[in-house]
Image (tube, rainbow, N blue to C red):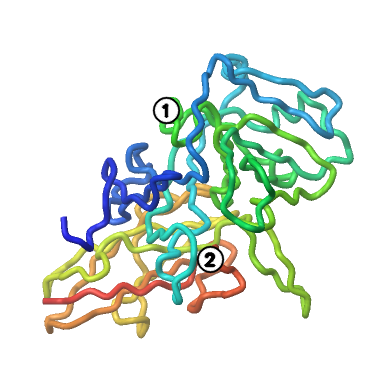
Amino acid sequence: MSEDSPRLIDGKIVRGENPLNLEMPFEKLDSFITPIESFYVRTHFPIPKIDRDAWWLRVEGEVEKKFAINYEELLELESRTIPATLECAGNNRNFLEPRVKGVQWELGAVGTAQWTGVPLSILLDRALVRPSAREVILEGADGGMLDDPKSPPGELRFARSIPLSKARADVLLAYKMNGSELPPEHGFPMRAIVPGWYAMASVKWLQRIIITDRPFTGYYQTMDYAYWRRRGDIVELAPLTEMQIKAEIAKPVQGEIVPANSVYRAHGAAWTSDGEITKVELSTNGGTSWSEVNSIEQAAPNAWRLWEFDWRTPSKPGKQILIARATDSKNRTQPIERDRDRGTYMINHLLPITVEVR
């Protein structure tokens, strides 16, 4: 391994060990469903050790009937299985200039799995949510002290909120991933899956669901995982929510040498939120011209579409710049330039890849 090669754990790129953050090398993308062993890992604190037999999920707050439910009882409830793409809100951060703080993800802090669990709406119905309720706070068992002067003193738990309407619509309390029990690093014994939203909302190691009648303003809702939103001449912090439309190139990779005057299979994935990817285009000349690519799968709500393109490489040696861009059913497409109001998150501007033709 050269000095420039990233360190790997089980085939994933190490972006941090304490807490553990592992990235899938995106060039390994080869199927709609990401295998568990390849799925990226994002943690903020040490992975909690949870005894399934002693674990309880508590539902409380603005409800008529607060209650607690254990793992076996949850397994008896109606379940659903859905494919959903999860993307870390900081995916692609490594490409920002100038360099910014945070986990230096490249392309692979994203993956798609089949998630099996109980619709959150079932638990909300059991609790009899009061008419005053506005949001649902999801609290994990992971926590600790933060080295951040803006953080509260003492320990805190990771928690995020979602609107009650979203919670009722499609949020899943998942206990299986690709048909297997959730691994500890992916939230055992239960995690939320919030389809179409950045993955910080899909809280792992769930232990409490709190229904509230006011906006949640916890640390990971305001001080972190937030961006600047403009309303006229007013600028305010807003929590991150929906994933932004994006296409990524898996192959070729940056700096790859490709043979001249040949057919090269370029491929990758594209995804969006609350819509479907309707078109992916690829430019092989730095954006001068674009060609529509072939989609490999049918569109599925809030799950990526894989794409491929047979690129006839130039006969002359030299550098070529490839760029992919996506369009969705709401006619959204990727911006050319980075929106700096987004800070270190929601990175979906066009990312060129330079290869050498020989």
In which image quadrant can residue 320 be found?
A: bottom left
* Tag shown at residue 179: 1
Q: Position of residue 70 (x, y in %)?
A: 62, 17
Q: Position of residue 349 (x, y in %)?
A: 48, 72
- Identified by mark 2, the residue type is Thr
Spatial separation of the CA atoms under disc 2 and disc 1: 34 Å
Residue at 44% across, 36% down = 185
Q: Which residue is mark 2?
A: 344
Q: Is residue 286 found left or right of 62 in the rendered image?
A: left
Q: Is residue 116 found left or right of 261 in the rendered image?
A: right
Against 244, residue 127 (above or below) is above
Residue at 58% across, 16% down = 54
In which image quadrant can residue 213 be found?
A: top right
In this rendered view, identify the residue nearer to me: 304 or 355.
355
Against 197, residue 94 (above or below) is below
- Identified by mark 1, the residue type is Gly
Residue at 75% across, 21% down = 67
In which image quadrant can residue 262 be found?
A: bottom left
In this rendered view, identify the residue nearer to me: 39 or 96.
96
Task: Give the foreground label among 2 and 1.
Answer: 2
Disc 1 is placed on an element classified as: loop
Q: Earlier in the sequence, mark 2 or mark 1?
A: 1
